[in-house]
Image (cartoon, coloured by chain):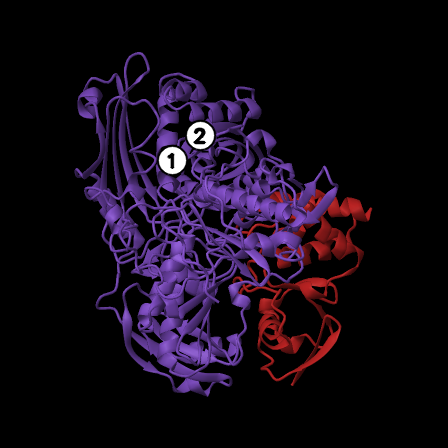
Chain colours: A red, B purple
Amino acid sequence: MIEITVNGVAHRLDVDPDMPLLWAIRDHVGLTGTKFGCGIAQCGACTVHLDGVPTRACVTRVGDVGGQAVTTIEGTGGPVAEAVRAAWRGIDVVQCGYCQSGQIMSAIGLLSQNKAPSDDEIAAAMDGNLCRCGTYQRIRTAIRDAARTLA
Amino acid sequence: MTLPSPSRRGFLVGAAAVGGALVVGTYMSLGRPGRAVAATPASGPVKPNAFIRIAPDDTVTVLVKHLEMGQGVSTGLATIVAEELDASWAQMRAAPAPADAELYANLAWGPVQGTGGSTSIANSWTQLRLASAAARAMLVAAAAEAWGVPASEIAIAAGVIRHPASGRTGGFGAFAARAAALPVPADMRPKDPAAWVHIGQPRPRLDSSAKTDGTAVYSLDVRRPGMLTAVVAHPPRFGARVRSVDETAARAVPGVVDVVRIPTGVAVLGRDTWSAMRGRDALVVTWDDARAETRSSAALAAEYRALGGRPGAVAASRGDAGAALAKAARVIEAEYDFPYLAHAAIEPLNGTIARNPDGSVEAWGAFQIPTMDQGTIASILDLTPDRVTLHTLPAGGSFGRRASTTSDWIAEAAWILKASGGGAPIHLVWTREDDMRAGHFRPMAHHRVRAGLDAAGRICGWEHRIVAKSLLMGTPFEAMLAGGVDPSTTEGVADTPYAIPDLRVEAHNAREGVPVLWWRSVGHTHTAHVMETMIDELARAAGQDPVAFRLGLLGNAPRSAAALRLAAERAGWGEPLPAGRGRGVAVHASFGSVAAMVAEVTADGPRLRVDRIVAAVDCGVAVNPDVIRAQVEGSVGFALSAVLRNRVTLADGVVQETNFDAYEPTRFREMPRVEVHIVPSGVDPTGIGEPAVPPLAPAIANAAAAATGTRMRSLPLEASARRGA
């Protein structure tokens, strides 16, 4: 049995400790907002927070999570998350939307640590999240908008 | 519940109360149906033939007959409905229409429901405007009846029905049931564009909310009671078959429930995705390559070049290109090579399928050509198509891949359901590697061009030969081939808007075992690059400005000329740039629209940085200008990596690039500043999902040539730069 806490709820999962956290969340915890894209930490669609730090769930063993708090897109809340979501909606960032859970988790992670990121800091935080629809220009604008809201 | 059959004579037919909702359907006469594609339209009971549902709570739900894959079609179609209904935007909703080729055919295609060719808004435009105008008239008639006042005294604005003389008001929901019982009016006329309040305004997307809080459900998120997840061992080479399989170790993996043979490989069924993946890793399969494609892409490219040296089937011929070239003052000869490209949507292909106790089947997926997907499932499971219900979910990207001419992904799910024999629903998951190795690539292509200039710098003869594998041969769309020429190979060349008096275009259909498919903008992905880089070479050889040179050839193409002028003007064409930077232009017409782009690049050794793209597009009436801008911005982000570096190669028939490390899409840091300008137009809307892809590569290549003085003809440019071609 593996014990993990996801979005504040403790779960006991009968899974192999080698199972990537991504599949534990999707197939056993039952939350599907965290997405599968590549399985090798190249696309960031599976980004969750471990104790607030953006982490690729597809290459994180569920057995290694231990007592760290797992937050998925469904569990986000608070001023930073709300500012990010409002900014995303305000300029209609999304197209297909599939990568956007991961994009938003990375953006929340950035703005939680750094309320006024430079363009270079935004790029560094977001470069690991692929968007095949090419919404990067709006993502950059939305992060700037959210930073202004939080200032 | 049985609904009235659609009349084939009337334009607007069929209204019925469904749970208190007003349902209005339309049936546009297609005349004589075209040839059947894959499956005939579903027979059996008539399904709700509806585009618009008005609920008691005043919400208006548009049933979207096209696949939402990010292009914003749900928002666009809802905008058209809101306009004619005089609804408020806040009450608008969208939901996927069921699979029904009778009611939801793509009117640009014939009796097939499907999404592609940037046709969604264009083919729905008149259909939805008239359906919505009829629904509005029925609401007015219902209110008039209820209030006992003449219909002519009733007005609707922002979702509120009013009788100004008496001061009475009501919402749509209050009158929906009564309206549904009324006859559908004929001879509707859509609104005067001068009265539009939604069309042309940047109405917010209807799907932004669900796509930013994790609640949007994609087909990979479908969960059915008791379902098993399937992961399939596919052959490493196209056309290979299973010779033998040892499933012992796979069956010993905890969570693995079954292992089944299917025509496309060996499927491992597990209680969860990870178990199925581990089970697949433990399979020992030997493959029979007797009928497999074993050539390398380099060998195929050499064959293409050899074919390009021989005359091909004639796609276009006017004047006498050979004679003109013979008397040209100067002739430029050039060859171009293009690689396979993967669509690489971030959501890998997947689908879920289940058999009901009565033997009928339900499937969940991002169905881009539901008529074919439904027919394919039915044929595998020995059912009639009406016994297959499709539940369409939004796609996590497609770029053409989910419009597979073989329905390969959902067909595989159906084969697994059949082979497993059990009652468990099957949830098929392709890993990234499965998705990348499955072919259906943008075809490789080879172009060979001879173009001449006379002493005055005018084009004097143009011979153009293209080699590519046909997208249509061997598919249900094969009848679209004309005289051996696949128009999707030659589009953008054979129909060039440039006034070239002596033009000859020939094509060869390459033969190989690699499945190919349309990739966002199809043949234009390579033809626009060749046309627009060669035009640039000719302009420079003639000592003329590339914009002025093009304008001189676009006398019969005013929309192209206008878009080109607008892009050039907004980009500051002609203004000086620092050393090492360059500006390039391209304009291309596709899917009924025109897109022009000016690129600014910085040359940094063999790498190019694209700094800025200024685009001007003409896609007719701009139904939602913000969605149009998003499509153009996104086209740049989508296609940039293909311009710079992406290619799928084969080594002895085996795909080499199987994940995003080796086939890296555009990343955040690389995204240039994109400025989008829309040419004002009153012409019926045309496409925008694809038309902004074709001009990107040539605009960048022309800018790179301006920056470096070196012309790189083939794509991707980084490979071209390395081999000095």
| Rendered location of residue B459, percent (x, y) | 30, 20
Tell me which amino acid carries mark 1.
Ala
| Rendered location of residue B315, percent (x, y) | 23, 36
Label 1 SS: helix
The answer to whether A32 is drawn above or below residue B52 in the figure is below
Query: Residue A36: which quarter of the image?
Result: bottom right
Tell me which amino acid carries mark 2.
Ala
Q: What's the CA distance linking mark 1 and mark 2?
A: 9 Å
| Rendered location of residue B420, percent (x, y) | 38, 81
Q: Is residue B712 left or right of residue A126?
A: left
Question: Can see residue A49?
Answer: no
Q: Quadrant of the C terminus of chain B?
A: top left
Q: Is residue B489 left or right of residue B641?
A: left
At x 60% / y 32%, what residue is drawn? B195
Q: Which mark is residue B528?
A: 1
Q: Earlier in the sequence, mark 1 or mark 2?
A: 1
Residue position for label 2: B586
Q: Is residue B171 left or right of residue B396?
A: right
Specify few, some or many for label 1: CA neighbours under 10 Å numbering under 14, 14-19, or 20 or more: many
State yes or no: discs 1 and 2 in contact (Cβ < 8 Å).
yes
The residue furthest front is B148
At x 48% / y 55%, what residue is drawn? B345
Q: Toward the viewer: B605 or B446?
A: B446
